[in-house]
């Protein structure tokens, strides 16, 4: 018990020290002449970044769309660092480009999904982005991206309203269901796609179905052992065997 209390106290002291250091750093950055550089630095390095600091830097002339290291705009940096909704809104209100891409070809919305930002942040970007033009280099649409990387099935409901074709494929014949079964970690996402009517029999360019990939996905395999979220897996299995 003593060590638990000691750990708790140490942890709280660490947080307090980090907060104080962040406030000192923010104060110093606000005095910087190069407001754009200060904005990039604040977004990348401050743990407890207040939206008011971002707003002040923007009001004092920071370029909200200036490309920094690795070709990232301030908005993309903010998303990669999982900044608060308040910070994201300040950048958007200042005119941040929602379709800007960094060298990894991820625009802010794709980056927010891949980095698993909070649901309010993702929804904010989703509501303001031209979803019809968003896809990966391989042609994967937003539903496929979210089903693979984002572990909140409720987001799939939002995207489904905009991307109604649940069986859309990329250039390699991969659907959202195949991608989620192959590279995803969420059985709940697979269940959601099945509820949408995803075709379990479709095969990609390698002739593999979602179930073929699911059997080798160690992130999902334990669901079978525990008997949890078994229904979508069982449905896949029975459907494949009935062909």
Image (spheres, rainbow, N blue to C red):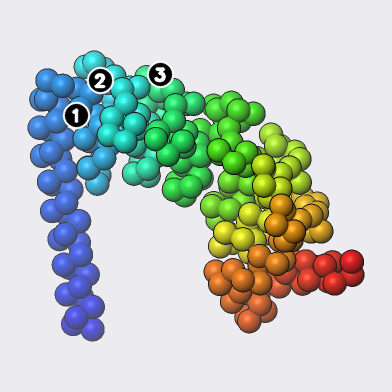
Name the residue located 24 percent from the left edge and 15 percent from the top edge.
Answer: 61
Q: CA distance from mark 3 to mark 1?
A: 18 Å
Pointer 1 with pointer 2, Cβ within 8 A: yes
- Determine the residue positioned at 85% across, 72% down: 241
Whole-percent x and y of residue 46? 22, 42
Quadrant where the N terminus sits is: bottom left
Residue beneath disc 1: 38
Left or right: 131 in relation to 113: right
Say which element carries label 1: helix
Q: Position of residue 198 (x, y in %)?
A: 77, 52
On screen, residue 125 versus residue 194, left or right, reads left
Local secondary structure at mark 2 = loop
Which of 178/130 is in front?
Answer: 178
Q: Quadrant of the C terminus?
A: bottom right
Residue at 26% across, 40% down? 44
Give the residue at mark 2.
Answer: 62
Residue drawn at point x = 28 percent, y = 25 percent: 55
Give the residue pinned by disc 3: 95
Decide: is 125 above or below 18: above
Comparing 158 with 169, the one in front is 169
Q: Is residue 90 at all visible to an observer of this figure?
A: no
């Amino acid at each position: 018990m003593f060590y638990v209390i000691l750990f708790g106290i140490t942890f709280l002291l660490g947080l307090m020290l980090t907060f104080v250091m962040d406030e000192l750093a923010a104060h110093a950055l606000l005095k910087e002449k190069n407001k754009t550089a200060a904005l990039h630095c604040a977004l990348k390095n401050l743990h407890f970044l207040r939206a008011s600091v971002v707003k002040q830097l923007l009001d004092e002339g920071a370029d909200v769309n200036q490309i920094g290291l690795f070709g990232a705009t301030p908005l993309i940096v903010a998303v990669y660092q999982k900044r608060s909704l308040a910070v994201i809104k300040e950048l958007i209100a200042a005119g941040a480009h929602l379709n800007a891409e960094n060298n990894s070809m991820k625009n802010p919305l794709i980056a927010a999904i891949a980095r698993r930002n909070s649901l309010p942040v993702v929804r904010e970007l989703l509501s303001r982005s031209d979803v019809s033009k968003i896809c990966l280099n391989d042609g994967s649409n937003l539903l496929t991206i979210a089903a693979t990387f984002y572990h909140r099935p409720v987001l799939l409901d939002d995207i489904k309203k905009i991307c109604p074709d649940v069986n859309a494929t990329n250039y390699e014949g991969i659907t959202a269901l195949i991608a989620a079964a192959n590279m995803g970690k969420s059985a709940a996402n697979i269940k959601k796609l099945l509820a949408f009517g995803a075709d379990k029999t479709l095969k990609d360019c390698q002739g593999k179905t979602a179930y073929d990939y699911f059997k080798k996905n160690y992130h999902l395999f334990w669901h079978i052992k525990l008997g949890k979220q078994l229904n979508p897996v069982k449905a896949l299995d029975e459907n494949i065997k009935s062909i």
